[in-house]
Amino acid sequence: MVLDFVFAHPIISLVAGVVLYFVAKSVLFSSKPVKRSIPKGKYNDKNKEKEFYDVAIVGAGPSGATMAYYLAKGGIKPLVLEKKQFPRDKYCGDAVCKTAIEILMDMGLYEKLIKENKAKVADSGGLVSPGGISYIGRSHEQLGEIPAAIAIKRCQEVGADLKENSPVADAKFDKEKGLWTVILEDGVTTYQARTLVCADGATSKLAMQLGVVKGAPNGACSRAFVEGGTHNLKADGVVFYNTGLLPGYAALFKHPNDELNYCCYLIPGNPLVTNDDLAYWHEYLIKEDPNVSKALGNKFKIERMRAGSLRLGGVPTSSGDHLLIVGDAAGMIDPLTGEGIHHAMEGGKIAAEFMLEAIAAGNFSAEAMQIYHERWMERFGNDFTWSMNICQFLYRFPVLIDAATAAVRRKGDKFLARWADIMTGRVPKTALLKPEFVIVITFELFILLAKKLTGQYKGVIYNTGAHSVQKKKTN
């Protein structure tokens, strides 16, 4: 009955849904949970001679490197096992927001990246909505790539023990001794640690093998670099929304030397777009989306597409007996944006701070380790549920993105900066409840609805999936 009404009266349902959505959020987020401390445990490894590591981290990406840094700074020498030799590549967008920048500054890396021209501060950015409404302004955001080799080298400088070319095949837990034995793929090399950390990316072979993380990644992203001087993009970063791809999107990020990073994100929420469609949409937007095509121009030189998996929205369980799951492996990627580097780094820092407490308490039980899961969920993970719901809403009502973009255009750069903080998860999605967002977006929404009646607005109010069906037929 409810769905029948929605399909019959999409505009009324849209307005009612917005109101109910905001009311529900305000009620559910009216109280904050109390932070739990770690009870005293049975282990006392401090200041003892031992033949094992306190912590073994599998994976030296943003989350693993960040965790290793803060553990080492806290006086714990972690083992970091990386399957490849640095420098290595990571197939995704390399843009990061303020949260990650602050961590890079704390690690003493940010100025080094800027000085060596390995990161770029974004002076201008914006978005283009499904209906073609756009705003490019002074973003005041700090964006840039994070060369993993530099980050992990910094970890080594403060005391982390990095083992490159060390792909992990398996890990066995001895409950009696309270120790993990990590076995490399050569079948000979092994390491022991009190706590095992899986920070090995969205596919996380190890976490899935251990049965903690279940199911395949639920999203995908592409990446291809565009040679500097061959494109038309003037801004430092632009997000492009195409109705057929919603809630997914494309983005162009400018790197040093005018090089562009072109990315296409497939995000759950559209039943007619699957991860198998990644290559199609990557090429389709370049050739057929008028806004992406305009930004690239007709002389651009682009490399071959690379693909990566996304585990979005957080996993139900990211801990176990003497075990933590961190970063992309734990699904620390916002379903609304597909971005996760800053969440991975913040999650790595939270994990390190938690482990320093756990080591001091001598408690690594499943019950104690669950506190880590609670902490990162409280910090940013709970927001993912609302992001997923918003994705479904945006897929059905593309006009909302048009209205939001029109609001950004009306209010200018400061509004864009606050909007960016919400979209990147730095500020909870509940901030959308504030009058400064509700009033202006609702105002723009009604303007667009009025223009639709007079034929002045060509965008899509209610998405029936016809645009994605059209895509399938023309493939």
Image: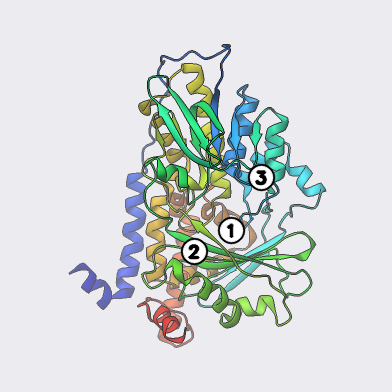
Point out the image quarter for the N terminus: bottom left
Residue 415: which numbered mark, if any?
Answer: 1
Check disc 3: other Cα within 10 Å, few if <14, some if 14-19, many if 20+.
Answer: many
Q: Which mark is residue 440?
A: 2
What residue occupies the far left of the structure in this picture? 1
SS class, disc 3: helix
Give how far apart the Cα atoms at labels 1 and 2 are.
11 Å
Quadrant in the rendering for residue 61 = top right
Give the x, y percent position of residue 331.
Answer: 45, 48
Q: Earlier in the sequence, mark 1 or mark 2?
A: 1
* Residue 85 coordinates in the image, percent (x, y): 67, 46
**Residue hosting label 3:** 101
Residue 309 vertical position relative to residue 359 in the rendered view, above or below = below
Q: Nearer the viewer, residue 206 or 302?
A: 206
Q: Residues within 10 Å of mark 2 (few under 14, many from 20)?
A: some
Give the mark, 1 or 3, whose residue is nearer the N terminus: 3
At which x and y percent is residue 90?
62, 54
Residue 98, image x, y percentages: 63, 47
To which quarter of the image does residue 111 belong? top right
Q: CA distance from mark 1 to mark 3?
A: 21 Å
Looking at the image, do the residues carrying marks 1 and 2 touch, with CB atoms under 8 Å apart? yes
Q: Earlier in the sequence, mark 3 or mark 2?
A: 3
Instruction: Name which residue type carries label 2.
Output: Val
Q: Mark 3 or mark 2, which is nearer to you?
A: 3
Q: Amino acid at mark 3?
A: Ile
Between 121 and 300, the residue placed more toward the observer is 300
User: What residue sits 43% from the left and 38% below the top?
Assistant: 378
